């Protein structure tokens, strides 16, 4: 990559959470990618993709980027494009929250178009309608491209460097699977498959990976019913499906309520306001859940290192957090309503 181009992402902190460590009875670290310039890990993958397209065109000024997004990928696209001096248009599903649409405009989007019920519908609109009308148009996929996975892999590389070695467990959210693919890529590079486990987290109603694993083939959800619209991808990438069948990966589905409770816990203990895509990761620290879910049955003790990727903080507001807190807090312990949809043997081992 030409060193003259500015990098659209930054190295983010890795901090140890005392409260979550005490709850999980191990060392729990938070990789704070909500502190990326775009507010999410998407700065890495989308940023790398855009850098490579600009390099291919030798810095041509005649490029207009088009992103299909649930919000975070669009914001990352706008940030990277504007940083490098290019316009960006985002097509977002009609289910996106008004606050997310406002954030896209505030970042400097050339246009924000609401179309379709899913990110797949938004992508089709770009490819079938917008790109044919713009000879300078470049499509920015939200997750399914090797350049995006390579950008996302920097999350895991940084984490290992900051830890001074490999973690025992990585907990990450799955929408289309770009983050999981990047994490698995680094695990393979370092031959860590036998020692690093990955928990792939989804919310019910946005669980395209988990339903695919149960079906034994890629499944397209009829629609997204989860409130975690940043996870609103009706079909994961083939690469993600392949990786998820590895023995060191476990797919887990929790309810929106548990994800919301996780957001409340992070706000209380870490003074951090994050979206449901992050909150869904937090329940693994409670009620012995982490130890029970690990496929290797390795013993988690006080020296074990668990990393939660704090992937984003755009699709959240103080009002949303307050409403969740009023609805959920104090009714029962966090572990009582956890729905685990993936406690099953690996159906097929697929080489990825």
Image (spheres, rainbow, N blue to C red):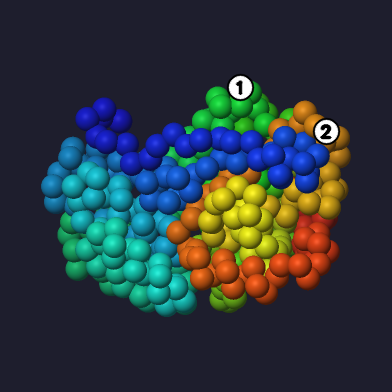
- Left or right of residue 261, residue 55 in this image: left
Give the quadrant of the C terminus. Answer: top right
Query: For residue 73, what is the image quadrant?
Result: bottom left
Which x, y percent locates residue 178? 51, 49
Asked if residue 235 lies left or right of residue 22, the reply is left
Residue toward you, 112 or 138: 112
Which residue: 57% across, 58% down?
Answer: 277
Percent position (x, y) of residue 296? Answer: 83, 38
Q: Which residue is mark 2?
A: 301
Residue lying at 18% horizontally and 37% vertically, measured from the top left: 58
User: Where on the picture, by quarter, is residue 67?
Assistant: bottom left
Observer-nearest of 266 and 48? 266
Crowdedness of circle 2 by 10 Å Cα count: few (<14), some, many (20+)? few
> Exactly how many numbered labels are in the figure?
2
Residue 99 x/y as whole percent: 40, 70
Q: Which mark is residue 164?
A: 1
Disc 1 on helix, strand or loop?
A: loop
**Residue at image point 26% right, 62% down:** 109
Element at badge 2? loop
Q: Is residue 296 visible?
A: no
Q: Which comes before the other along the chain, label 1 or label 2?
A: 1
Query: Which residue is nearer to you in this view: 295 or 78?
Result: 78
Residue 149: x and y in percent read 48, 43
Task: Give the left or right position of residue 205, taking residue 130 as reference.
Answer: right
Residue 108 in sight: yes
- Which quarter of the rendered picture does the N terminus lie within? top left
Q: Is residue 22 above or below residue 73?
A: above
As drawn, the residue found furthest toward the left would be 61
Of residue 149 and residue 337, the one placed in the foreground of this image is 337
Q: Residue at coordinates 65% horizontally, 72% vertically from top-left? A: 326
Label 1, residues with CA under 10 Å away: few <14, some 14-19, many ≥20: few
Distance from Cα at disc 1 to Cα at disc 2:
18 Å
């Amino acid at each position: 990559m030409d060193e003259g181009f500015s990098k659209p992402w930054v190295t983010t902190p890795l901090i140890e959470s005392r409260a979550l460590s005490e709850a999980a009875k191990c060392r729990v670290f938070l990789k704070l990618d909500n502190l990326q310039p775009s507010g999410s890990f998407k700065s890495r993958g989308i940023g790398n993709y855009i850098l490579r397209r600009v390099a291919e065109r030798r810095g041509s000024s005649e490029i207009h980027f088009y992103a299909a997004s649930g919000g975070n990928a669009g914001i990352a696209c706008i940030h990277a494009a504007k940083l490098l001096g290019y316009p960006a248009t985002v097509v977002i599903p009609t289910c996106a929250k008004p606050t997310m649409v406002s954030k896209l405009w505030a970042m400097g989007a050339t246009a924000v178009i609401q179309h379709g019920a899913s990110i797949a519908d938004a992508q089709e609109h770009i490819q079938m309608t917008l790109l044919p009308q713009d000879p300078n148009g470049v499509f920015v996929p939200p997750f399914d491209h090797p350049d995006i996975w390579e950008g996302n892999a920097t999350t895991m590389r940084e984490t290992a460097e900051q830890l001074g070695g490999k973690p025992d467990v990585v907990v990450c959210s799955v929408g289309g699977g770009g983050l999981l693919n990047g994490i698995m890529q680094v695990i393979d590079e370092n031959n860590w498959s036998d020692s690093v486990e990955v928990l792939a987290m989804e919310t019910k109603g946005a669980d395209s990976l988990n339903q695919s694993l149960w079906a034994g083939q890629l499944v397209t959800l009829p629609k997204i019913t989860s409130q975690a619209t940043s996870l609103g991808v009706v079909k994961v990438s083939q690469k993600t499906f392949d990786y998820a069948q590895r023995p060191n990966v476990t797919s887990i589905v929790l309810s929106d309520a548990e994800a919301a409770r996780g957001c409340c816990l992070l706000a209380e203990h870490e003074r951090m306001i994050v979206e449901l895509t992050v909150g869904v990761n937090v329940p693994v620290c409670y009620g012995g859940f982490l130890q029970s879910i690990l496929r290797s049955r390795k013993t988690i003790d006080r020296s074990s290192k668990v990393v939660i990727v704090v992937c984003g903080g755009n699709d959240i507001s103080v009002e949303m957090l307050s409403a969740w807190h009023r609805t959920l807090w104090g009714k029962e312990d966090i572990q009582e309503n956890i729905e685990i949809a993936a406690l099953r043997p690996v159906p097929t081992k697929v080489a990825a």
